[in-house]
Amino acid sequence: MDARKLTNISNAAISALVLSMENMGINLSLIWSQLANAFQDEHIRGILNDLGLQVKGDDVKSITESFMDEMMKSGMIQRMNVTSASDTEIVLDLGDCVFTQAGHAARGEGRDIIPPCSIMAILYSIINRTTGKNLQITKYEFKPETNSCYFTIKVEE
């Protein structure tokens, strides 16, 4: 299977899972937080390790910067800019992510919500596992003209 077909089936599967959970009455913020928690699972972490994802660092800033480098190397995103990263807030710009279609499906037409994002969930799980800190996305914006997602994330003790 070529990469485009694999991306399409992955986006379809993620979209179907999110939609089915919404149809069961589970709200998107709960889906998002549980997605982040699921990336703590040893089996799922093993899959990420098999992909070569080796994030280093011991504080929010160094983990976020290492994560950015690893995501770029993996090809899962084509652009990731860390506007700021501290022990209180992270501001990121993600561009041309392989899961963009799934985010669109979760948001729906004109919905002003923060869609579940696998990339952000992975970052959340790594920061939480390493530092014990929790994250909360406080602002999200999608800009179709640049195919970019902008996230502002509050870092909590």
Image: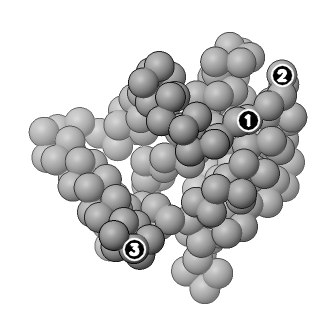
The disc placed on residue 80 is: none
The disc placed on residue 58 is: 2
Q: How many marks?
A: 3
User: At label 2, which amino acid type do we have?
Assistant: Asp
Are the residues at dot 3 and dot 2 in contact (C-beta closer than 8 Å)?
no
User: Around disc 2, counting alpha carbons within 10 Å, would you say few (fewer than 14), some (14 to 19), or many (20 or more)?
Assistant: few
* SS state under label 2: loop
User: At label 3, which amino acid type do we have?
Assistant: Asp
User: At label 1, which amino acid type do we have?
Assistant: Val
Q: Quadrant of the C terminus?
A: top right
Image height check: is 134 above or below 54? above
Are the residues at dot 1 and dot 3 in contact (C-beta closer than 8 Å)?
no
* Res 93 seen here: no
The residue lying at 39 percent from left, 74 percent from top is: 2
Which of labels 3 and 2 is toward the front? 3
The disc placed on residue 2 is: 3
